[in-house]
Amino acid sequence: MSDTVKLTIDSVEVEVPRGTRVIDAAREVGIKIPTLCYLAGVHEAGVCRVCVVEQEGRLNLLASCMLAAADGMVIRTNTPRVQRARRTAVELMLSDHVQDCLSCERSADCELQDVARDFGVDGKRFGQQLGAARVIDRSSASLVRDSGKCILCRRCVTVCDQVQTVGTIGVQERGLDSVIAPAFTGLGDAVCVNCGQCAAVCPVNAIYEKDSIADVVAALLDPGKHVVVQTAPAIRAAIGETQGLAPGTLATGRMVTALRLLGFDAVFDTNFSADLTIMEEGTELLGRLQGALVDRDPAVALPMTTSCSPGWVKFLEHFFPAQIPNVSTAKSPQQMLGAVVKTFYAEQKGVAPEDIVMVSVMPCTAKKYEAGRPEMSDSGHADVDHVLTTRELGRLIRRYGIDFAALPDGAFDDPLGLGSGAADIFANSGGVSEAALRTVHELVTGRELPAENLHVRDLMDIHGIREIELTFSDCKPEYRWLEGVTARVAATSGLGHARRLMEQVAAGESPYHFIEVMACPGGCIGGGGQPRLTTDAVRRARFQAILAEDEGKELRKSHENPDIATIYAQFFGEPNSHRAHELLHTHYTAREKV
Ligand code: SF4
Ligand code: SF4
Ligand code: SF4
Ligand code: FES
């Protein structure tokens, strides 16, 4: 049997690999069939019916996203019957939809609005008759769910259940009363890890981040407040998309200038505290390895896992509470920078910490939840006061009339604005491990990590579980105990993969010493707060931009960041010191599974 099939679409013959869906085959002849539910490789359920086509010899219209291309098939994508059916499908959706496009946050970024406009549908034919009473659930720290906007495409259900294996939301009730929601409770009380992947795939404004723009604007307008901002590594590769630039456009300098125009008193880089994380987490890992290999201490928990993804941390607290000791105690870079700002920076600047407002811009909705965790205020003040997603910063920039594309490049402020290339790659899945290896290998052996251009190619990618082995040789005298030891490292993103790795750990069968987990597929570049729609092509473009940012720097290792050396000399003493533990480390809480 041939690996390909030949079919005819709108009078054009096309040959495609066997198994290709008609919707994808149509692209080969230049036809983009509209969709509202289909996400290739993720959600293939044939629910919305806006992708229907005619197949010669078949009576019914068929959903092209579910139809496998076959030899001899004759497809018509734009007959009057097809057009009528698609229009009716959209009109019925609009009839069960709160149609307030003018004031809706998704206006101009809404897949339903786009399709309705393309079809010339205005929503008047059937009027507005909501099947179930509208519920706006604001109980979550990170997300809002608005049933009045939901078109029941079920993308969120599939992503939460199949990709993240959390299963928070599902279809409740039947028929016209159907709603997408957690069973019996609000999102805030459900087992939800706040990853925002549901919001990232929602085609309309039915699940979205809890908006912190009003709080940030109020702080900026308050003359008594010193308002500082930090931006995560992944923002620089995605903020441009909110302003009409192509995915993968690096906009670091323009982003800094935009933040100054918004009125922030200082613009800091989360890259600084990503470097700090490597120092703290790397030291912790070496300590655990020594405890296990030299002291033979059975209480040492290995493998050690990363802790910088708050969606991952909450997932572990719910589903693998017995493995909490395996997680690094290091706070995430967001929280570390906040703690440094409210202590070291406040002291240096002579500003009372209670007068400082720390805002962070994150690719992540879970960071909103993380900032509000009660343990994230060891200095006596919340490390971080408000969290904006990339999407929210994009809205704020547009609201202030800032012509982003035309902005000149700005530079981050001292002393918390200098970050290494190792910090940039925190944005990519596998990047934290590579950053840690760049530092740990050099600390242990005195030599640079033996990897081409410092990249551990087998570790960083947007899919699957990757693993590498690294054998230490010619170690410095103080690390003789690591001579000949082979470290095993795994990196993954997406909680379904993380679940597989943690099941191994729970069974005592994990071969690894160090595991990196990022909750969102692809890592922070694919975060739940990033511009929509994050397809694999978009992930790859952002991923490459982050590599370019790293490779374009002279400073590419966390331990070589001179400002990191300064903060240890002037404030923390050394990595994992008492003060560092007090401000830069935390603890976790076992939570219920249901
Ligand atoms: S979700 Fe889209 S179609 Fe619905 S009100 Fe908002 S912009 Fe309009
Ligand atoms: S935030 Fe994540 S865990 Fe919570 S409902 Fe959405 S996809 Fe599921
Ligand atoms: S909340 Fe959004 S993604 Fe989920 S079913 Fe409704 S419209 Fe689809
Ligand atoms: S895109 Fe095919 S049924 Fe929704």
Image: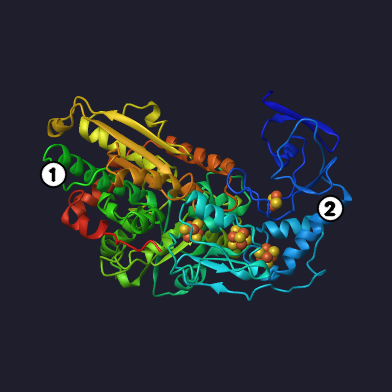
Depth check, front residue: 127 or 54: 54
Q: Which comes before the other along the chain, label 2 or label 1?
A: 2
The foreground one among 212 and 289 is: 289
- The correct choice, above or below, for 206 with respect to 247 in the image is below
Total tally of numbered discs in the picture:
2
Where is mark 2, residue-wise?
Answer: 83
Residue 577, relative to residue 183: is it above or below? Answer: above
Query: Is disc 2 placed on a helix, strand or loop?
Result: helix
Residue topped by disc 1: 297
Q: Position of residue 179 (x, y in %)?
A: 60, 67
Q: Residue at x 18, y 49 (%)?
A: 574
User: In the rendered image of this protein, does residue 209 appear above or below residue 80?
Assistant: below
Q: Quadrant of the C terminus?
A: bottom left
In this rendering, the answer to whether 325 lies above or below 291 is below
- Circle 1: element type: loop
Amino acid type at image mark 1:
Asp
